[in-house]
Image (cartoon, coloured by chain):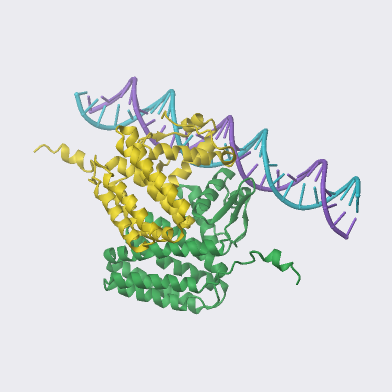
Chain colours: A green, B yellow, C cyan, D purple
Amino acid sequence: MTLLEKTTASPDTLTEDRSMAIRESLRNAIIDRRLAPGTKLSEAEVGALFDVSRTVARAALQMLTFEGLVKTERNRGAFVSNPTPDEARQIFASRRLIEPGIVAGAAERITAEDIARFREQLVEEERYMNERGPAARRAEIKASGDFHLMLASVAGNAILQRFMDELVARSSLVIALYGRSGVSSCGHSEHFAILDLIERGDAKRAADLMLHHIDHIEADLDLQPKQGVALKDALAIT
Amino acid sequence: MTLLEKTTASPDTLTEDRSMAIRESLRNAIIDRRLAPGTKLSEAEVGALFDVSRTVARAALQMLTFEGLVKTERNRGAFVSNPTPDEARQIFASRRLIEPGIVAGAAERITAEDIARFREQLVEEERYMNERGPAARRAEIKASGDFHLMLASVAGNAILQRFMDELVARSSLVIALYGRSGVSSCGHSEHFAILDLIERGDAKRAADLMLHHIDHIEADLDLQPKQGVALKDALAIT
DNA sequence: CATATTCAGATTGCATACAATTTGAACAGG
DNA sequence: CCTGTTCAAATTGTATGCAATCTGAATATG
């Protein structure tokens, strides 16, 4: 529990709510894998790190629990989520339902300035792709998720946007846990293709491609039941 | 703020978490319209009602805020949400994306016992439909929502189920606020029809009908911008 | 009479204190 | 050496106290 940028937040945003800022910071740390799944997040420790009382730290942890990024066990504390393969499948099943609709919404409302921002985002994503090392890998996963979130924000439905915030964050966890090596090389080009179709106003094809894109991301995972029954079987000496 | 059943909860469930129980109780009160939109929910008052400290009451209110059933303004307090027409549209747009998928999932996994439970639920719904008076109206809205929630629980995706919990609860608020008089007479028969199609394993048609069903619910609303610019215009004496 | 100002009451934001629970290590017994 | 027990340290759950903020009514002012 070390590398937490205590974001000296923008003057107006931090004025708002400190627990929200802490949530944001922890969120980023979790989806960046600076906080590994299973890591304990004790209220006192979080409070000390951000220089607030347990009350505020606790509120932040409650929010993260609601989002599914943290699992809280009564009287035991909060831990970074360790999604099971089954949860992973549920996450992607949910995305398959929601994201085609988001693409359709985005296709209707996207502006030229939006498209410019998207292209910037995609070149940045590309840059991380070509870098090596775990830090670049994390940044790549993050940037890839951001593309989906930008689409959600353009689609103009605040509720779906919030759902996507949660789903993308949890997806990042899942990818970090279950992802195979050569990840999103194809995923990235699909982002480009989706954006092109949206720009051309071909909402139907864009939505279809998004569906395939999600399939590809999921297909790139190795969703074995982890250790599952391992203990029982591992000790069953033949 | 009177009619709150302080549910003498089931021995095992209440042991769990008191703020959760309070959340549940307030939730029910809100979607039943015993707590009208705009009602202030002060921490002290909620705490006194449930015989807990502000700390616990506050946690419950935070959860409801996350669900969108309550809006919290900094330094001012928590209020039962008063969804705008635009929010209402977003809610139904979200449901249109998610519920067809839920129907498909339910069609795959539904059992004979499930179907029996659904039929029970539907006759209860029918009973409320034939009763008169606001209490029956509330119960009808609640029961109608429960049908959708039961589908979600059968579909076997915990994430979507949680999304639906939120969407159905907020829909109840919207219907209570913007619903026209002769509400769900058609909606109810559609529930029957959807269940029949699911039972027959015709997932595609069931999903399509669900889509229409949501359209019908939304079409039955009167989503005018409420008073909106009213004040300015109302005083503009021609 | 309308508008601006002041101030007390009430309410939330936050920190802290105490009680309840869990955990794991020391220790006793087989 | 292994197992079961006891107990203290640590952590969470909850209540409460104080400071900051908002609200609205009373008052002052043009």
Whether residue A113 is visible here, answered yes or no, is yes
> Is A105 placed left or right of A238 in the picture?
left
Q: Residue furthest left?
A: B238
Closer to us: C15 or A44? A44
User: Eyeballing the image, is B5 above or below A196?
Assistant: above
* Residue at image point 74% right, 67% down: A235
Q: Quadrant of the C terminus of chain B?
A: top left
> Is A75 placed left or right of A65 in the picture?
right
Q: Quadrant of the N terminus of chain B?
A: top left
Closer to us: A26 or B96? B96
Closer to us: B214 or A78? B214
Whether residue A12 is visible here, answered yes or no, is no
Q: Quadrant of residue A126?
A: bottom left
The image position of residue A203, as x and y in percent, is: 29, 69
The image position of residue B3, as x and y in percent, is: 42, 29
Count of number-bearing discs: 0
User: Eyeballing the image, is A226 above or below A161?
Assistant: below
The image position of residue A212, as x and y in percent, is: 40, 73
* Residue at image point 30% right, 53% down: B213
The image position of residue A186, as x and y in percent, is: 44, 78
* Residue at image point 40% right, 58% down: B102
